[in-house]
Image (cartoon, rainbow, N blue to C red):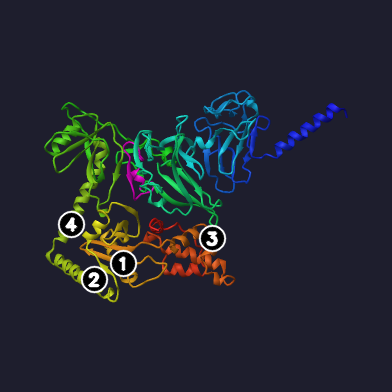
Amino acid sequence: MSLAAAVATALAVLAYSCTAADPDTVSARRPLRGNGTVVSAQGKFELGLFSPGASGRFYLGIWYKNVPVQTVIWVANRASPLSSAASAELRVSPDDGNLELVGLIQNSASPAVAWSSNMSLSPSTSPSPSPGSNIAVMRDDGNLVLLGGDDSSTVLWQSFDHPTDTLVPYAWLGENKVTGEYQTLTSWRDAEDPAPGMFTDTVDRNGSSEFFLLWNGSRAYWRSGVWTGSVFANLPEAVNNVLFNQTYVDTPAYRRVTSVLYDNATITRMVLDLTGQTKQYIWVPGSQSWQFFWAAPTVQCDVYSLCGAFGVCSRRSQPPCQCPRGFAPAAERDWGLSDWSAGCQRSAPLLCGGNGRPTDDGFLELPDMKLPDDPLAVSVRTRAECESACLNNCSCQAYAFSGDGSCAVWNDGFRNLEQLYADAGNSSAATLYLRLPESELHGAKRKSRRLWLVLGIILACLAALGASALVAWVLLSRRKRRRSEMADQLKGSSLQVYSCGDLRAATKNFSEMLGGGGFGTVYRGVLNGGTEVAVKKLEGLRQGDKQFRTEVSTLGLIKHVNLVQLLGFCSSGDEKMLVYQRPPSTFFPVWAASRVVAGDMAAVADPRLRGDVVEGELERACRVACWCIQDQEAHRPAMAQVVQALEGVVDVQMPPVPRVLQHLATMT
């Protein structure tokens, strides 16, 4: 073999060895082709092409390597999908050193650049003299970085500066003051399309530390509150977070929020989902599933225009969006993918007369509604005049009339219509009169006549004097018996009886909410002596009263290191509140629930029992315990189910973390 041939062979072997030794790297010499992937050094994250659902489109993305449910945290070519993976290539451009994805873009005949890093050098960074030597590295924190080939410590571009819909620990959201770029989250368009959707999560463009959720880039529907030094004011769930330490910093170069894990083995993410809510999830190895942790806003219907034009949002239905009578989804396929932004469209056009001409249009009465945003005020004196004003305007779609004589109309569509419920005590509920053609009203009118007939029969029966007297007597007797039972139950306890006015003052008129659940809402309060307490305001007359009697009669007599002590209560008519002491700094239920969710059941067992504990029985007992303290009574198992679960007759799924424990943790 000649010397030249030997040298060439050695160089080839060396090049292959270097390539094989860097499975986390993409370079000009080692592009990523087709369905190949790049894995971070410790095998935590993977970079490659993926195709969501049945879309048939391909995107360059990053996902968790060891999570069996493919969970994508970053997408490169969101708006330029590839039609095939076979011809795709991720490479470092030899011309300018950019990382670029080349392939067949939708409806193209030849390969083209579908995405490029388009790196912009900072004033302190000089162009590489040999841009073709740049390398891209997939790091174990989920960050894809482009490094200068001549100086591998120089970061020329990184995916953490360009997040999509997900924020992972060590990444950030905020503003780069040097480049003027903002790091924001933008939702997917639908479950099979990662193109930018309607919702964004961004820091205040006016310079404050507050973050906003925006619809269509302009309409704010939720705000985080300013950074207090340890937490964002409107995110009490983040206080004493057992998963990570969150910080906000503001320097001359940038202002941003980021987080650091307490345990690097924890897998957690915050995603701005396609329904407009930011949600925090944690991966539970024991159940091999993502566990929901918290959401903002907590109520899905608080997302602006969640259901689009003419859509009706309901907190008690799934999916939450419905179309009113006379309307149908404007994009049926999108609704099936949880994208309701297109809203509803009329099934039949209006037969508008206008300018006083006769019309066959009428109005459908929609009671108990939260009225849409942006109404137009019309000066009238009666509801008939308000209705006439709407009928005489062909653009008018609906109207509402209040008892004080105010008339509101909506022209050319409306958004944010929400169905409320009388049993929830919503004082803002109103009636909306939706304009429909006569053909769509016939069925509603027949149903209305039947309803009035039934109501008439019921009212006639209830009007009977004897029945009314009997009902009154039963109610009075039951109330007296309940008061007697309460007095007996409180004997021997050291509970303090507070006035509801004192508790209202202690909580500053219930201004600082810690959370909700368990038949009421919990507020932070400080008593006259400076004692910090949690005041639980019970809601719902029937359930609240039951919960009130149960907790006062039992928790008031029990003192245990692992129970939040009940200090006292107030009861004035239908207004009932419970006063709890401030939890100790190490509150066992919160710690124990976090261990159960993390799959570390052995940690909650008494160390003295080591060797005598059957792991399967301990795991079942821990899961059953968490199910028994769920916030919603309907989610708690019956005693028969508890016995079957403990005996191993039925499987016990991993329970969610009770929200009441999350809120108690905020006080520790």
Instruction: Check residue 482 in the rendering and tell me which mark sits there, or answer none.
Output: 2
Residue that badge 4 annotates: 457
Q: How far apart are marks 3 and 4 (CA)?
A: 60 Å
> Which span of residues is magenta-colored?
299-319
| Residue at the spot of label 3 | 600
**Which image quarter: residue 475?**
bottom left
Q: Does the magenta stretch include residue 192?
A: no
In-image side of 103 versus 221 (left or right)? right
Mark 4 touching mark 2, by CB under 8 A? no
**Amino acid type, mark 1:** Leu
Q: Which mark is residue 518?
A: none
Q: How far apart are marks 2 and 1 (CA)?
A: 22 Å
Residue 37, horizontal then vertical, whole percent? 63, 39
Q: Is residue 410 above or below residue 480?
A: above
245, 53: nearer the viewer:
245
Q: Where is residue 268 in the image (x, y as percent from the top left)?
A: 50, 49
Q: Which of marks 3 and 2 is nearer the N terminus?
A: 2
Could you tell me the amino acid type at mark 3?
Answer: Asp
SS majority, magenta: loop
Q: Residues within 10 Å of mark 4 (few under 14, many from 20)?
A: few
Note whether 662 is above or below 176 in the view shown: below
CA distance for labels 1 and 3 = 33 Å
- The residues bearing labels 4 and 2 have C-alpha atoms spaced at a distance of 33 Å
- Asked whether the beta carbons under mark 2 and mark 1 sit within 8 Å of each other, the answer is no
